[in-house]
């Protein structure tokens, strides 16, 4: 997204201006002007990125604008790196040093003038981009990224063009639910037994595991609802206001009565609203379900409205982020259930229910069993993937040829098939919800081949070499990089493959279907070009990285791009010395060369 590119290059420009005091006359001013222009654009980048990514928004001009801004950021990065490369070039010694020095100074002066001309051109380009932004009425953002605009009084979204696919998981029939028998019984125990103290039950896991489905299954159970005086189910998501949540909560509590209080809720100030909710709940055993919580400090925002009245009240939350559950522990008794992928037998059972529920007695026909199990295997035991792809197959004719097409082209189908939109949308939310500094870090997982377990130290060193890690005097870059990886793990985006003796992550990976989302983002953002086949052509343009998972010699010989910051090779064939030498001469600002 443009926000990531702009914020990254802003940091580069600020560091550059701080360290390079002897820039050619005028260049420093141009860099400062460019920095100011980028900072003024930055305030509405969240809205620009959101609208550019919204497939329902038909304004192609916004996508073009975002692309132009991203490419201008790349140009600034290129100019800075080229200047630093030239300034820190190898200095000759010995008897030819003087002659070389004179020639070098002349060459450097010429190149500095070229850089001055380039940065002047970039400055004018960014000024034009800023002027064109006015036609799109971007909203200025002072808060964390949200997926849509918010009505300040109710917290409701104004974007009605796209129905949140998570909504359907609040209304799944119990007969269509598979694999939650054990977790359901554990949640029943936490809800109905145990301490009288106000307790939070947190269901944590990656997008698509069925957190909402499990929580709603338990919440709607009559054996649960009959034990509580009042219940409310509130969808939180990334776009919410606390005020809106409290109003929705009271509306659910009073939905079956003609309560005059509902008429005045919207007119109350925040303090009065909190007092009103507390008074309503003070002498009741209440059950509140907050679905899809993203903010770490969510507990601080809602705590005051929920009294600890020692009546056995319970709060259920679903979240992709372990930090959300941990934050509740400051003020609440907390139970955490970390939801896992389905066992293989349950994955197969869910697939058969989804595809053959109304035919073949709910069983897979023998002639389709082999290809069906191939498809289920590609879903990697993720319930949402099985449901989405099962829904797609239920619309296809039950023939071997038709199903083999789906199996062979599953990656392509994810990007274009309307039946799989909910799957890609939900997985994409995890990426879209990341802070800008973690987005390039998670994209790096797409550089590695499918099913590849990545060494922790190798990965974090590459982040550092690329400049993704921002450290200070209190922490080393390695410590900050470890924190980045830990945050991605706690957000349920990165899976731990192996652990070392001291409990430290040794290798890690991402789910294959989330990797498909990453691959699409990488192409969209010119982050990396991945070569999987010998015959694949390389059309990289401004792409910053190259990943080669096939015979590298022919591929790398044809890769002529001085913009490469990183080249990764995962398949060695014979001597690489000649190719490496050529790469180093062509890619003058290469930061990472990784040959495995």
Image (cartoon, helix red, strand yellow):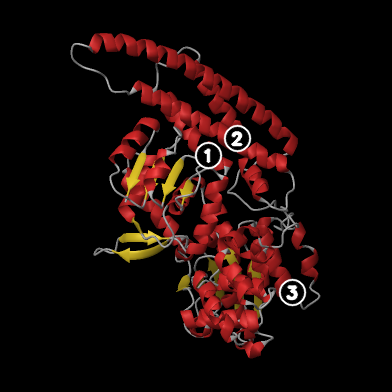
Q: Is there CB contact under 8 Å for labels 2 and 3?
A: no
Count of labels shown? 3
Q: Position of residue 592 (x, y in %)?
A: 36, 41
Measure the alpha-carbon separation of dots 2 and 1: 9 Å
Measure the alpha-carbon separation of dots 1 and 3: 47 Å
**Residue in the image at 36% along x and 65% along y:** 497
Residue 460 against residue 339 in the figure, above or below: above
| Observer able to see residue 470 | no
**Residue in the image at 38% along x and 10% along y:** 106
Q: Which residue is mark 1?
A: 5
Q: Bin the neighbour count of mark 3 within 10 Å (Cα to Cα): few under 14, some 14-19, many 20 and up.
A: some
- Which residue is at the far left? 94
Q: Nearer the viewer, residue 425 or 139?
A: 425
Q: Which residue is mark 2?
A: 69
Quarter of the rendering containing residue 588: top left
Q: Is there CB contact under 8 Å for labels 2 and 1?
A: yes
Q: Which residue is mark 3?
A: 254
Measure the alpha-carbon separation of dots 2 and 3: 49 Å
325 displayed left or right of 159: left
Q: Secondary structure at mark 2?
A: helix
């Amino acid at each position: 997204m443009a926000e990531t590119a702009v914020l990254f290059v802003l940091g580069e420009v600020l560091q550059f201006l701080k360290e390079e005091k002897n820039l050619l006359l005028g260049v420093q001013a141009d860099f400062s002007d460019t920095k100011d222009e980028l900072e003024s654009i930055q305030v509405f980048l969240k809205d620009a990125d959101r609208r550019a990514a919204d497939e329902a928004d038909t304004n192609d001009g916004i996508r073009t604008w975002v692309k132009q801004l991203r490419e201008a950021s790349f140009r600034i990065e290129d100019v800075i790196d080229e200047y630093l490369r030239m300034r820190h070039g190898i200095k000759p010694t010995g008897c030819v040093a003087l002659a070389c020095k004179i020639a070098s100074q002349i060459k450097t002066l010429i190149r500095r003038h070229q850089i001055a001309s380039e940065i002047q051109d970039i400055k004018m380009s960014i000024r034009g981009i800023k002027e064109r932004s006015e036609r799109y009425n971007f909203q200025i953002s002072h808060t964390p990224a949200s997926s849509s605009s918010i009505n300040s009084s109710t917290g409701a979204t104004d974007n009605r063009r796209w129905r949140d696919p998570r909504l359907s998981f609040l209304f799944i029939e119990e007969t269509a639910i598979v694999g939650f028998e054990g977790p359901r019984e554990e949640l029943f125990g936490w809800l109905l037994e145990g301490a009288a103290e106000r307790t939070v039950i947190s269901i944590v896991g990656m997008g698509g595991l069925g957190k909402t489905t499990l929580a709603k299954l338990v919440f709607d159970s009559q054996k649960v609802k009959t034990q509580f005086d009042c219940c409310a189910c509130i969808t939180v998501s990334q776009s919410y206001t606390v005020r809106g949540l409290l109003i929705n909560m009271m509306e659910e509590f009073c939905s079956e009565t003609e309560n005059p209080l509902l008429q005045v809720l919207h007119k109350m100030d925040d303090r009065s609203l909190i007092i009103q909710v507390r008074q309503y709940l003070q002498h009741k055993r209440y059950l509140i379900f907050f679905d899809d919580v993203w903010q770490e400090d969510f507990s601080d925002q809602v705590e005051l409205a929920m009294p600890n009245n020692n009546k056995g009240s319970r709060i259920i939350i679903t979240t992709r982020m372990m930090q959300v559950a941990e934050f509740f522990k400051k003020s609440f008794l907390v139970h955490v259930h970390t939801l896992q992928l389905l066992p293989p037998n349950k994955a197969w059972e869910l697939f058969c229910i989804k595809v053959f529920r109304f035919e073949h007695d709910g069983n897979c026909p023998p002639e389709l069993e082999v290809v069906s199990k191939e498809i289920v295997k590609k879903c990697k035991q993720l319930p949402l993937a099985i449901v989405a792809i099962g829904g797609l197959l239920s619309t296809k004719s039950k023939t071997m040829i038709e199903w083999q097409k789906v199996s062979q082209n599953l990656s392509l189908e994810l990007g274009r098939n309307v039946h799989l939109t909910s799957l890609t949308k939900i997985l994409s939310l995890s990426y879209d919800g990341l802070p800008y500094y973690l987005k390039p870090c998670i994209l790096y997982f797409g550089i590695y081949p499918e099913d590849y377990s990545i060494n922790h130290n190798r990965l974090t060193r590459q982040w550092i070499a690329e400049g993704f890690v921002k450290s200070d005097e209190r922490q080393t870059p390695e410590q900050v990089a470890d924190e980045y990886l830990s945050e991605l793990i706690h957000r349920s985006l990165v899976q731990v493959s192996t652990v070392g003796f001291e409990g430290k992550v040794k290798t890690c990976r991402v789910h294959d279907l989330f990797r498909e989302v990453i691959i699409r983002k990488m192409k969209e953002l010119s982050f990396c070009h991945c070569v999987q086949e010998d015959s694949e052509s390389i059309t990289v343009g401004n792409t910053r990285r190259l990943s080669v998972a096939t015979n590298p010699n022919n591929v790398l010989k044809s890769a002529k791009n001085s913009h490469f910051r990183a080249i990764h090779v995962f398949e060695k064939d014979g001597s690489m010395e000649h190719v490496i030498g050529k790469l180093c001469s062509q890619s003058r600002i290469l930061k990472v060369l990784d040959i495995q």
